[in-house]
């Protein structure tokens, strides 16, 4: 005697019926449809600071791979490789970044040490230079320089400095009042900030209604 098929469940976000819920039944007990998982993924990839894709708990990368493998007609492609790199940075407790201020890329644990006989170098996969994992300066032979010997040399960039560099590379703009950073993905240049200021995303001036011509 044949067993009746299990009834479809509803996506907790859009309420669509989900038939492949064996793959999309999350540890927290909720079910997401593939379209909502993709939308969640897109929001995560644009978020600053980065946060993993999640419902009540983090969504396993195996689920994301399965959704990414579905037909492209379901939505934009999902860059799982880039997501894995961002996830590695997020999960690494002792973060290390390239010593070169023009780069500042994250160096994952897999690329640290083992590249030389001293076992203290880290290879940047972006600019291919080496960073000393002891003093976080350019890789060198011999003892690490002391703070006194560094003198006026470049200080290690702070998290804020690295974020400012990232903002500059991606063209994000800061509110002229509260300095919150905003990424505009669509729509007009009129930004209504949470601090109450209305400003122009194109030229960064406020108030928006009386900021003069900027070619907006």
Image (tube, rainbow, N blue to C red):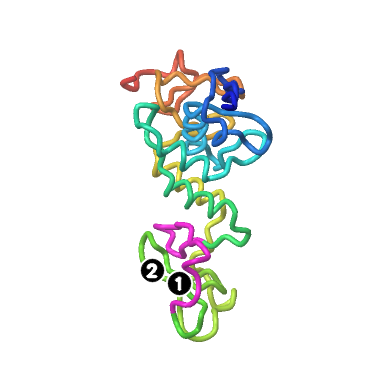
Q: Earlier in the sequence, mark 1 or mark 2?
A: 2
Quadrant holding the N terminus: top right
Q: Are marks 1 and 2 in contact (CB under 8 Å)?
A: yes
Dot 1: element:
loop
Instruction: Please report the residue visible at 36 percent of the width from the left and 66 percent of the height from the top.
Output: 128
**Eyeballing the image, is 79 above or below 208?**
below
Residue 195 occupies quadrant: top right
Q: Determine the residue positioned at 53% across, 74% down.
A: 150
Position in image of residue 84 (x %, y %): 48, 50
Magenta stretch encompasses residue 41: no
* Magenta span: 97-115
Q: CA distance from mark 1 to mark 2?
A: 8 Å
Count neighbours of disc 1 (C-alpha within 10 A) and say few if under 14, some if 14 to 19, many if 20 or more.
some
Q: Residues within 10 Å of mark 2 (few under 14, many from 20)?
A: some
Q: Is residue 189 left or right of residue 33?
A: left
**Residue named by callout 1:** 138
Residue 89 or 84: which is nearer the viewer?
A: 84
Percent position of residue 109, x then y: 53, 65
What element does badge 2 sit on?
loop
The residue that mark 2 highlights is: 129
The single residue placed furthest to the top in the displayed view is 209
């Amino acid at each position: 005697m044949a067993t009746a098929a299990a009834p479809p469940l509803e996506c907790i976000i859009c309420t669509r019926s989900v038939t492949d819920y064996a793959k999309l039944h999350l540890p927290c007990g909720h079910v997401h449809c593939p379209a909502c998982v993709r939308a969640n993924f897109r929001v995560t990839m644009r978020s600053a600071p980065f946060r993993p894709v999640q419902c009540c708990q983090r969504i396993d990368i195996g689920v994301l791979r399965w959704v990414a493998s579905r037909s492209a007609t379901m939505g934009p492609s999902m860059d799982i490789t880039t997501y894995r790199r961002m996830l590695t940075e997020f999960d690494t407790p002792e973060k290390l970044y390239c010593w070169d201020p023009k780069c500042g890329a994250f160096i994952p644990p897999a690329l640290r040490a083992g590249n030389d006989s001293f076992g203290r170098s880290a290879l940047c996969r972006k600019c291919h230079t080496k960073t000393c994992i002891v003093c976080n300066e350019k890789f060198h032979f011999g003892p690490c320089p002391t703070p006194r010997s560094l003198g006026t040399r470049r200080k290690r960039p702070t998290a804020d400095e690295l974020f400012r560099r990232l903002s500059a590379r991606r063209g994000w703009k800061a509110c002229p009042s509260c300095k919150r950073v905003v990424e505009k993905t669509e729509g007009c240049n009129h930004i209504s900030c949470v601090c109450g200021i209305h400003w122009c995303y194109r030229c960064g001036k406020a108030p928006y209604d009386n900021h003069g011509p900027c070619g907006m």
